[in-house]
Amino acid sequence: MKEITIGLNTENGQNTITTEKIDGILDALIIDSNEPIEVIIESELGYLIFTRRSISGCNYFSVRNRTTTPIESLRDFPGYELFNLREKLNITIIGRANKDINFIFRVLWLYTSLINF
């Protein structure tokens, strides 16, 4: 497991950054903020990974993707899968001006992520 630490500032009340390419499985996200903030994390490919309003304090989130049931199944079996990342992430924070927020991404690195396909 590897931890990627990112520090951000809300600047004028909103700030967006793009991370370096993350190659691995996103297991957890830790957000530390002294003031309530809104966080939106999206893949550079356009899909939503995480969104929450009114986060304050130190919070640990197990980030999961809700799976869908195949159409041929008559019953819904909810499942939650880890995000398999191989792209950059866009992180947007909204809150009071000039506040520091710390993010820690816990990413599982696989042997296959070391091989370029």
Image (cartoon, helix red, strand yellow):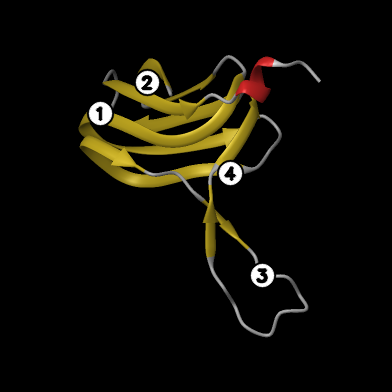
- Which three-letter amino acid code belongs to the residue tagged 1? Asp
**How far apart are the two marked residues, 3 and 4, measured between alpha carbons?**
19 Å
Quadrant in the picture for the N terminus: top left
- Estimate how packed mark 2 is, as few (under 14), some (14 to 19) or many (20 or more) residues with alpha carbons within 10 Å: few
- Which three-letter amino acid code belongs to the residue tagged 3? Thr
Q: Provide the residue designation for mark 4.
A: 48
> Which of the two discs, 3 and 4, sits closer to the camera?
3
**How far apart are the two marked residues, 2 and 4, measured between alpha carbons?**
24 Å
Task: Tally the numbered discs.
Answer: 4
**How far apart are the two marked residues, 1 and 4, measured between alpha carbons?**
21 Å
Q: Where in the figure is residue 82, as x and y percent of width and height? A: 53, 44
**How far apart are the two marked residues, 2 and 3, measured between alpha carbons?**
43 Å
- Estimate how packed mark 4 is, as few (under 14), some (14 to 19) or many (20 or more) residues with alpha carbons within 10 Å: some
- Which three-letter amino acid code belongs to the residue tagged 4? Leu
- Estimate how packed mark 3 is, as few (under 14), some (14 to 19) or many (20 or more) residues with alpha carbons within 10 Å: few
> Which of the two discs, 1 and 2, sits closer to the camera?
1
The structure residue drawn at horizontal position 39% and vertical position 46%, both measured from the top left corner, is 52
Sequence-wise first label, 1 or 4: 1
Q: Provide the residue designation for mark 3.
A: 69
Sequence-wise first label, 1 or 2: 2
- Is label 4 in a helix, a strand or a loop? strand
Q: Quadrant of residue 105?
A: top left
- Is label 3 in a helix, a strand or a loop? loop
Toward the viewer: 1 or 82?
Answer: 1
Toward the viewer: 101 or 66?
Answer: 66
The structure residue drawn at horizontal position 44% and vertical position 44%, both measured from the top left corner, is 63
**How far apart are the two marked residues, 1 and 2, measured between alpha carbons?**
19 Å
Q: Provide the residue designation for mark 2.
A: 12
- Left or right position of 28 against 18: left
